[in-house]
Amino acid sequence: MNSRLLSEEIGESMSVPARAFSARVQLPCRVFCGPDSILELSGVAVSIDTGSLVLALPAPSGSLNMPQPGDKVRLELSLPVTEMTAGAKCLEVRARVSEITEQVDGSHQLTFTFRKASFKDLVEDPLPKASKVDGKVWRM
């Protein structure tokens, strides 16, 4: 290859401005908290970064028990599906509430910290409950 052409190609690739990375998102997210994760809250993840996630929760209607700083929760972040053949996926995270900020409109922004996340298939229908067999009890 001609050295002049090579230097022009390198010059062109270096002159292309780098895209700015943004951690801002708008993805549906469910928060499971409380004993045995019995409480479920829904919100929108507005920012995600390595080790942290910011979730916007709407203004509470009625008595809403929110997790408090230091509480451990499980998050399911719904990922967008871009192809018809692809199944819905979510990012599952075990996290800790690090900060809660109340907004002017009464909504809240919760900041979570986490170490690792895992990808899971989203199940459309709830899983059927296991049937109880009369007289048989599992024991350890």
Image: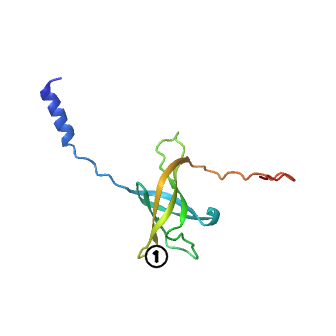
Q: Residue at x 22, y 46 (%)?
A: 17
Would residue 109 be visible to someone looking at this image?
no
View extreme (left): residue: 4
State the image coordinates of residue 26 (x, y, percent, origin top left): 43, 58
What amino acid is at disc 1? Gly
State the image coordinates of residue 99 (x, y, percent, origin top left): 44, 69
Q: Is residue 46 above or below residue 102?
A: above
Q: Is residue 14 above or below residue 75?
A: above
State the image coordinates of residue 80 (x, y, percent, origin top left): 47, 49
| Residue that numbered label 1 is attached to | 106
Camera-side residue of 12 and 3: 3
View extreme (front): residue: 140
Q: Is residue 85 above or below residue 65?
A: above
Which quadrant does the N terminus fall into?
top left
Q: Is residue 40 above or below residue 128?
A: below
Question: Callout 1 environment at 10 Å: few (<14), some (14 to 19), or many (20+)?
Answer: few
Would residue 125 be visible to someone looking at this image?
yes
Q: Is residue 120 left or right of residue 137?
A: left
Q: Residue at x 12, y 28 (%)?
A: 4
View extreme (right): residue: 135
Q: Is residue 10 left or right of residue 71?
A: left
Residue 36 falls in image quadrant:
bottom right
Q: How many marks?
A: 1
Q: Residue at x 21, y 43 (%)?
A: 16
State the image coordinates of residue 37 (x, y, percent, origin top left): 61, 62
Q: Secondary structure at mark 1?
A: loop
